[in-house]
Image (spheres, rainbow, N blue to C red):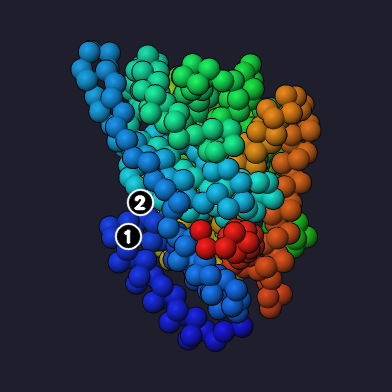
Amino acid sequence: MAGSKAVQKEVKEFMTGLKRRNPHEGEFHQAVQELVETVMPYYLDHDQFRKWRILERMTEPDRVVMFRVTWSDDTGTIRANKAWRVQFNNAIGPYKGGMRFHPSVTLSVLKFLGFEQCFKNALTGLPMGGAKGGSNFNPKGRSDLEIMRFCHSLMTELFRHIGESKDVPAGDIGVGAREIGYMFGQYKRLENNFVGVLTGKGLEYGGSLIRKEATGYGTVYFAQNMLNHIDDSVEGKDVVVSGSGNVATYAIEKVLHYGGKPLTASDSGGSIYDPDGIDEEKLEFIKQLKEVRRGRISEYAEKYSSAKYLEGKRPWGVKCDIALPCATQNELNADDAKELIDNGVRVVAEGANMPSTLEAVHHFLDAGVLFGPAKAANAGGVAVSGLEQSQNSLRISWDAEEVDGRLQNIMKDIHAKCVKYGEGDGKVNYVAGANIAGFEKVAAAMVAYGVV
Ligand code: NDP
Ligand code: 2IT
């Protein structure tokens, strides 16, 4: 293995070039830095990858489509939003990755997400390349009809760039079953073709059981695998969760199944802390609140007197054994990491994409916390998307037990890959393990194609 000084020098030089080529893309720089820091020693030891300049090629998307989405709101006012689809890399399969609707969406955000998706998808063992898309559209407070007009308009451009063997979008922040339905309906109409071009579809029109639950369940399966590896388990543990959307809700549900105690949930307004624990009945309230009524998490504290509402605060100050960041990028910084470590956290599994800053990750690793990075820990969502594609191609539907069983096996397998590539000195560095395992698969496929 190359010496650490030489490695650091190569990382620095590589990042200088990447930042020069991609100015003002902080999130993208961060995601690449995290990968390159851990992959560089492996890269320097593998001449075939260096010779083919795989890292330089892999950090440049295959293509980016940028377009305008024009729609009219309920008052008749014309609106125009920006939208993108970043088709990052299809070396190991058709492009695959979610669509995000949120005012914070920029090209940099979608490039970081698309880049990480390539390695995450590789880890699942399924044939899926990496992509991400989305818009700076803010769905909050919009009526169903406004959402529908926006989704139809977006698909009126996007349809020509996607396809069941080309690029298969799915959900992400601000894009759930409702939005997928509107987008799929418009795709089908424009192409006159009923194929599995989106995943996360409703069960009535080709969706898969367990897709809705998959990311949150998968994150807790991953945490359970990390704990089982040291002869421990989620049972009896205090768990702090951020977010109250799709990923957070089903992470809380699986913690309950495993006998853990979920203590918190949050949204962009603040966090709720329930020292009595969020039980099945309280979780049902959150599901109704968020999936049906689209309300604020503060209502939980109005309903349950056991809970406190921490306005404008993230939940990282609450003492816990396990932390599951499940909201958004950079929601857990160095100070939060120190506080969690001081309070005795033993496991962090990232349900969201890049929720921990690079400094926070370094703190967790230095403190010996079992840290499951997003690429590995939240791969369950896209894995079941891959299974939805398989079911669509086969024109069959597996039952929930079948899909959940496959999901559990995939998460176990990802854990094993992280151990294989990240074990040293009796410890597992899951960041290095996930990055190297994902990188190796994509890189080997790129080498096989020659210079393209
Ligand atoms: P949802 O839209 O269902 O929920 C997002 C949650 O995060 C909401 O509680 C939202 O609060 C909160 N949130 C979003 N942005 C911010 C912000 N800037 N500050 C504070 N809170 C915020 O999205 P998902 O649950 O699907 O996604 C959550 C994370 O998981 C994202 O990082 C996503 O990329 C990742 N992920 C999702 C997968 C999936 O299958 N859905 C798969 C793998 C990863 P509010 O309502 O107030 O905005
Ligand atoms: O970040 C992710 O992995 C997702 N939003 C899910 C992508 C997918 O294609 O299911």
Badge 1 density bin: few <14, some 14–19, many ≥20, Cα 10 Å = some
Name the one closer to the observer, 202 or 333: 202
Q: Residue at x 40, y 20 (%)?
A: 152
- 2 or 1: mark nearer the eye: 1
Q: Which residue type does callout 2 highlight?
A: Ser
Whether label 2 lies within 8 Å of ligand 1 gets the answer: no
Q: Name the residue under label 2.
A: 108
Reading the chain from its start, which is encountered first: label 2 or label 1? 1
Q: Name the residue under label 1.
A: 22
Q: In this view, does 66 lie above or below 291?
A: below
Which quadrant does the N terminus fall into? bottom right
Q: Residue at x 54, y 43 (%)?
A: 95
Whether label 1 lies within 8 Å of ligand 1 gets the answer: no
Q: In this view, does 245 lie above or below 359?
A: above
Q: In this view, does 162 lie to the left or right of 449?
A: left
- Residue 430 spot, x, y in % from top left: 62, 63
Q: Which residue is drawn at 29% across and 32% down?
A: 68
In the rendered image, which quarter is residue 138 located in?
top left
- Residue 426 spot, x, y in % from top left: 71, 75
Q: Which residue type does callout 1 highlight?
A: Asn
Name the one closer to the observer, 388 or 141: 388
Q: In this view, does 83 lie to the left or right of 338?
A: left
Q: Is mark 1 on a helix, strand or loop?
A: loop
In the rendered image, which quarter is residue 39 located in?
bottom right
Is residue 428 shown to the viewer in this render? no
- Residue 333 spot, x, y in % from top left: 41, 58
Is residue 293 shown to the viewer in this render? yes
Name the one closer to the observer, 118 or 175: 118
In the rendered image, which quarter is residue 15 located in?
bottom left
Q: Are marks 2 and 1 in contact (CB under 8 Å)?
A: yes
